[in-house]
């Protein structure tokens, strides 16, 4: 365990700090731009596709597609009841506080860290069904980030404009 932690690149700990800070901020009402909101789902989407194809080949694409689709659906469900306001002119969203982003961030970090460690320390396990299953769970969680974004976008179509500069 000590070897695994000591061989972890510094950027991984910076990433963990970024994820924890974002999750902590999300527990309270906050305003975020659409551009910034797009970053995490895009990275998670591409990372999940890259790792699946790199370690399990193109044969795993159907499993990836099913997992990402399921994650998008589940993620969109997590925003259905949130208190949201949209500043459509400034392209800002006010999101009610919740712990879901923190849970998703810790989940994806833990899964990706574990999978990365397995690929690094035990490459012979890379092609096993158990690791393929874990990759699909990580893909599902990655899809949840995209699903939340989709849920926000859908809700923005039905919720009237609010001037968030006045709040």
Image: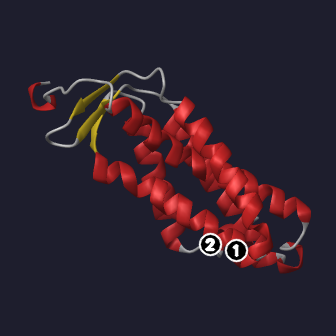
**Which residue is under mark 1?**
53
Total residue callouts = 2
Q: Nearer the viewer, residue 100 or 132?
A: 132
Left or right of residue 115: residue 166: left
**Residue 33, percent from left and from top:** 26, 45
Indicate the secondary structure of the residue bearing disc 1: helix
Residue occupying the point 42% across, 30% down:
27
- Identify the disc placed on residue 76: none
Q: Nearer the viewer, residue 58 or 133?
A: 58
Q: Quadrant of residue 9?
A: bottom right
Indicate the secondary structure of the residue bearing disc 2: helix
With respect to residue 162, does 26 lie above or below? Answer: below
**Which residue is under mark 2?**
50
Residue occupying the point 36% across, 28% down:
28
- Pointer 2 with pointer 1, Cβ within 8 A: yes
Residue occupying the point 38% across, 39% down:
153
Residue occupying the point 37% across, 21% down:
83
The 10 Å Cα crowd at callout 2, few under 14, some 14 to 19, many 20 or more, is few
The 10 Å Cα crowd at callout 1, few under 14, some 14 to 19, many 20 or more, is some
Residue 138 seen in the current view: no
Residue 126 seen in the current view: yes
Left or right of residue 35: residue 97: right
With respect to residue 56, does 70 lie above or below? Answer: above
Left or right of residue 95: residue 129: right
Disc 2 versus disc 1: distance between alpha carbons? 5 Å
- From the image, which quarter does the N terminus lie in? bottom right
**Residue 15, percent from left and from top:** 48, 61
């Amino acid at each position: 365990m000590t070897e695994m932690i000591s061989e972890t690149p510094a950027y991984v700990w910076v990433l963990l700090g970024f994820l924890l800070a974002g999750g902590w901020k999300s527990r309270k009402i906050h305003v975020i731009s659409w551009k910034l909101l797009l970053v995490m789902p895009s990275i998670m989407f591409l990372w999940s596709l890259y790792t699946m194809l790199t370690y399990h080949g193109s044969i795993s694409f159907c499993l990836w597609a099913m997992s990402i689709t399921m994650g998008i659906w589940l993620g969109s469900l997590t925003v259905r009841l949130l208190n949201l306001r949209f500043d459509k002119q400034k392209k800002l969203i006010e999101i009610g506080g919740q712990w879901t982003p923190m849970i998703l961030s810790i989940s994806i970090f833990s899964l990706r860290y574990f999978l990365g460690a397995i690929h690094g320390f035990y490459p012979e396990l890379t092609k096993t069904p158990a690791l393929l299953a874990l990759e699909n769970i990580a893909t599902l969680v990655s899809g949840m980030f995209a699903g939340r974004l989709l849920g926000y976008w859908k809700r923005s179509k039905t919720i009237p404009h609010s001037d968030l500069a006045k709040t």
